[in-house]
């Protein structure tokens, strides 16, 4: 079990406790959001929640392992992690291996099990980048020595965007910038990287007609209330009807197949409807506290590698939480992205629980209590 090991090596027990608590809360909300659609589509109202419970159990076991495995050994796994991540991302395009859903090839499947490689690739990038700069901290001083990190980030973004998956591409891009900043890259080099990325975003939107439609729906969802604007409107209906205290747990009306993907990308809308503004604020207070403890662990890490790998884990989590919240509230154009630890999705919950085990491990070595 994960437990303190004494004052000098106790670690920040809040990290695994909060992560597991959020995952357990996720099981509850997945059931609430999915029981109606699961019964209609699969004849079993527990279909999604059983899968989520299995994922949480596997993730908890993975967390126990990573919490007690010397994180310093990951430093040698940077290149293998990147190669594995790239192979998995490319595998989605292999006939018979890749699984297509709603026109996107984002999963690989075998023996009845599906995996979303992009969820794994994000953390593979963290391991590679942390190890790369930890081996030679002077690499942050020259633009030429940043190219391996930029190359890996660009390759991952390219493989993800052609799935297509704009949301995870944005996450990886922001993660790359965040990791470079945490490593201490010079502002002028960051600016040189940010400018072409900023210019690439509108190009990517224009390149795909469906992205233009989503942008149009974001600007005026009532222009296509039964088309591209439908999902955003249903999300806003859910959040609005929740009021201050919500309609009560399990009492959501939007989950009755009005709100698409209510158990995954838009589960926050159901939480807002059932638990209201107060419930959402409490959820994000807990989420914010977890991010704070992660940052604290990174700052108190005993070495640069620990600091960077902890920073990367916190960045992945924080970026995804913020983007999901902005999407469901209509603050940015709709894009498919799960709420970490909460939304339905085994690959996501397993990798995040394992990652928070690593974060706890870093906090043990740095005495972040």
Image (cartoon, rainbow, N blue to C red):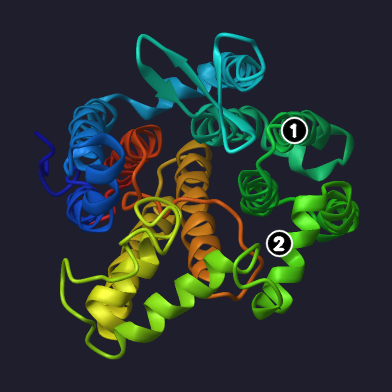
Q: Residue at x 22, y 28 (%)?
A: 58
Q: Residue at x 75, y 66 (%)?
A: 215
**Image-quadrant location for residue 140:** top right
Q: Position of residue 357 (x, y in %)?
A: 29, 38
The one nearer the camera, 2 or 324, is 324
Q: Position of residue 245 (x, y in %)?
A: 22, 87
Which quadrant: the C terminus?
A: bottom left
The one nearer the camera, 63 or 211, is 211
Which quadrant: the N terminus?
A: top left
Mark 2, residue position: 214
| Left or right relative to 356: residue 99 | right
Q: CA distance from mark 2 to mark 1?
A: 17 Å
Q: Are marks 2 and 1 in contact (CB under 8 Å)?
A: no
Q: Compared to 207, does 235 lie above or below?
A: below
The kind of secondary structure element at disc 2 is helix
Q: Compared to 84, does 118 lie above or below?
A: below
Mark 1, residue position: 162
The kind of secondary structure element at disc 1 is loop
| Left or right relative to 310: residue 85 | right
| Left or right relative to 247: residue 77 | right
Q: Residue at x 84, y 52 (%)?
A: 197
Q: Compared to 264, does 119 lie above or below?
A: above
Q: Position of residue 124 (x, y in %)?
A: 54, 28
Q: Position of residue 207 (x, y in %)?
A: 88, 47
How crowded pointer 2 is (Cα within 10 Å; few <14, some 14-19, many 20+) is rated as many
- Can residue 224 be seen at all in this image of the molecule? yes
**Image-quadrant location for residue 29:** bottom left
């Amino acid at each position: 079990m994960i437990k303190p090991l004494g004052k000098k090596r106790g670690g920040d027990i809040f990290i695994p406790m909060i992560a597991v608590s959020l995952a357990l809360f996720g099981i509850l909300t997945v059931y609430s959001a999915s029981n109606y659609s699961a019964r209609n589509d699969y004849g079993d109202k527990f279909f999604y929640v059983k899968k989520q419970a299995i994922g949480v159990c596997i993730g908890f076991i993975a967390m126990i392992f990573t919490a007690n495995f010397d994180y310093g050994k990951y430093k040698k796994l940077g290149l293998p992690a990147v190669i594995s991540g790239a192979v998995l991302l490319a595998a989605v395009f292999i006939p018979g291996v890749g699984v297509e859903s709603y026109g996107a090839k984002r999963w690989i499947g075998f023996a009845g099990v599906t995996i979303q490689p992009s969820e794994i690739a994000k953390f593979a990038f963290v391991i590679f980048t942390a190890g790369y700069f930890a081996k030679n901290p002077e690499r942050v001083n020259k633009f030429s020595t940043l190219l391996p990190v930029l190359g890996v980030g660009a390759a991952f973004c390219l493989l993800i965007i052609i799935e297509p998956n704009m949301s995870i591409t944005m996450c990886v891009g922001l993660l790359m910038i965040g990791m470079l900043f945490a490593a201490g890259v010079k502002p002028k080099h960051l600016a040189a990287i940010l400018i072409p990325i900023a210019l690439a975003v509108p190009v990517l939107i224009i390149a795909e007609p469906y992205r233009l439609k989503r942008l149009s729906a974001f600007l005026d969802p009532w222009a296509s209330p039964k088309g591209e604007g439908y999902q955003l409107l249903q999300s806003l209906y859910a959040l609005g009807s929740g009021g201050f205290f919500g309609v009560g747990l399990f009492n959501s009306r939007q989950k009755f197949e009005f709100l698409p993907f209510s158990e995954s990308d838009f589960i926050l809308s159901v939480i807002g409807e059932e638990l209201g503004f107060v419930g959402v604020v409490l959820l994000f207070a807990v989420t914010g506290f977890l991010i704070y403890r992660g940052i604290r662990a990174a700052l108190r890490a005993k070495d640069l590698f620990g600091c960077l790998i902890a920073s990367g884990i916190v960045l992945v989590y924080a970026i995804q939480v913020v983007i999901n919240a902005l999407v469901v509230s209509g603050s940015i154009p709709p894009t498919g992205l799960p709420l970490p630890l909460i939304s339905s999705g085994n690959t996501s919950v397993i990798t995040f629980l394992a990652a928070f085990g690593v974060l706890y491990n870093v906090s043990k070595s740095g005495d972040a209590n």
